[in-house]
Image: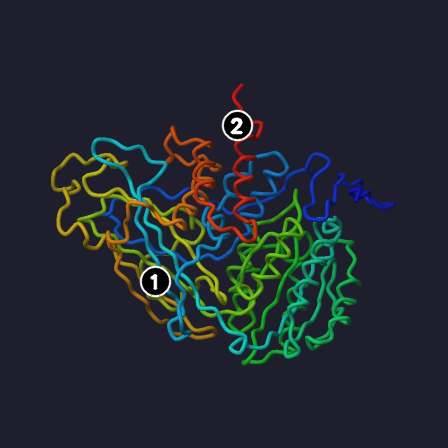
Amino acid sequence: MRPALVAAAPGQAPLNAVVVTGSRIMPGAPAPSDTETYPDATPNPVKRTADQPVSTFSIDVDTAAYSNVRRFIDEGRSPPADAVRVEELINAFDYGYARPTSLARPFAITTAVVASPWAPRTERGGRQIVHIGLQGYELPQGEQRPLNLTFLVDVSGSMRSPDKLDLAKQAMNLAIDRLRPQDTLSVTYYAEGAGTTLQPTPGDQKLKMRCAVASLRASGGTAGATGMTNAYDQAQASFARDKVNRILMFTDGDFNVGVTDNKRLEDYVAEKRGTGVYLSVYGFGRGNYQDARMQTIAQAGNGVAAYVGDLRDARRLFGPMFDKGAFPIADDVKIQVEFNPARVAEWRLIGYETRLLNEADFANDRIDAGEVGSGASVTALYEITPVGGPTQVPERRYPDNRIGVGGGDPNGEIGFIQVRYKQPGGSRSDLIQQPLTSRAAGAQPPEATRWALAVAAFGQKLRNDPWMSADYGWDQVLAQAQGARGEDPWGDRAEFVQLVRAARDLPERRAP
């Protein structure tokens, strides 16, 4: 089938030509003027264990950065460094972690300790990677609560594009396919004002739902805050404590009319979160994509933030992954790792720059953190320098301030892992604890760890992180990924290998 060329309608400003291939929307002309925004994500520094032995952060199951990074590379350009949230690249993949067997303890922890592939080795040894995998409980269908969903759709003029509203409609129809008779759906929209095209409707009335989605048209400005108020009113109209009450927002985030202050929006969404209505945000488009605003709103709403760059993303997010975003198993999930200064001289957390917490926040149940959905997993990687190894922070002048020489049981504790979480809608947290030992180390790293390292290396190379050895180039990243593909039933890993190859071959990376 010949690709369709999309032209501007009469009276509209000219649109860039876009080729719709059926699986991915590819640019046929240079990208529009770039007003995209991203939250600051300066790479985490290396820390001395003697000074700062504890790392605390909120989990992040978002995958928006992966799809967005792929979009940039597909367009033949490198993504901005702040767009590359390495943890979201890593968490875009399944690692086959051991699964918990009961919702009473909804998380299982898997660990591994391996040599760092990108760190130079010296006569004093090299650095190591600590791989922590947190697997969430997968709710059987009989344990899944009814859904009370509200679509909040941006139909402003900025959404008039095949990779925006048209793609959002396809995503919404995929979500409708997943609804059960006991579920309900409302459809609301906003542009210069706000409205409702579908009042709360049972999940078995799919034709009515599809007609409501099909009626949406893009025009006018963007009063995102007004749209949110209307969406929350609709969600409250069919609210029930025994349901999952959630708003799904479809937007490019470009609020140019009405309340646009991120803090006011964040406070409003956080207030509504307290009533039991959560908010997830799905981003679309390019040129004016407002990632920073969408991340802020989704985090405040105890929801996920995802980027939908093509139909494959839509099928993944609203197909096999739909349950992970729809049915929560835990709220306010935090991870804290305490490193043993007798074993670990230095450490750095790879990614999670926008999710860092203070040490005291871990046990404070008033501090908000991320939500985890049914069957979702979270991966965290630390690069550590064992005591006696080649440290990166300069040695101190006075002996009493220097790092020791180590010792003790070589199979003893490297650190201690703690996870706090609340039951969905709960106010008091529960605690899971597990020691981290050298027994997690092996001569041959597990396939899951090798794959996570490939994705982490890819993200760090894209950001030009200072911790990567000059000898570890794009060919090494590609070899790491090719050697760890393993079983790949959905083709996600094969796609990533192609993405690494494309990133390596970007014009700015070619030798003159």
Q: Determine the CA span between mark 1 and mark 2.
A: 42 Å
Q: In the figure, residue 104 lies in which quadrant?
A: bottom left
Looking at the image, is 228 positioned above or below residue 307?
below
Tell me the SS state at disc 1: loop
**Position of residue 372 measured from the top left corner of the image (x, y, whole percent):** 47, 64
**Residue occupied by mark 1:** 362
**Badge 1 local density, few (<14 within 10 Å), some, or many (20+)?**
many
Comparing marks 1 and 2, which lies closer to the viewer? 2
Q: In the figure, residue 218 lies in which quadrant?
A: bottom right
Looking at the image, is 96 positioned above or below residue 427?
above
**Position of residue 15 measured from the top left corner of the image (x, y, whole percent):** 77, 41
Looking at the image, is 246 positioned above or below residue 65?
below
**Badge 2 local density, few (<14 within 10 Å), some, or many (20+)?**
few
Looking at the image, is 157 positioned above or below residue 189?
above
Position of residue 446 in the picture relative to residue 397 (left or right): right
Looking at the rendered image, the quarter that the N terminus falls into is top right
- Tag 1: amino acid: Phe
315 or 47: nearer the eye? Answer: 315
Residue at 54% of width from left, 47% of height from top? 66
Residue at 36% of width from left, 54% of height from top? 132
**Residue occupied by mark 2:** 509
**Position of residue 52 measured from the top left corner of the image (x, y, whole percent):** 26, 49
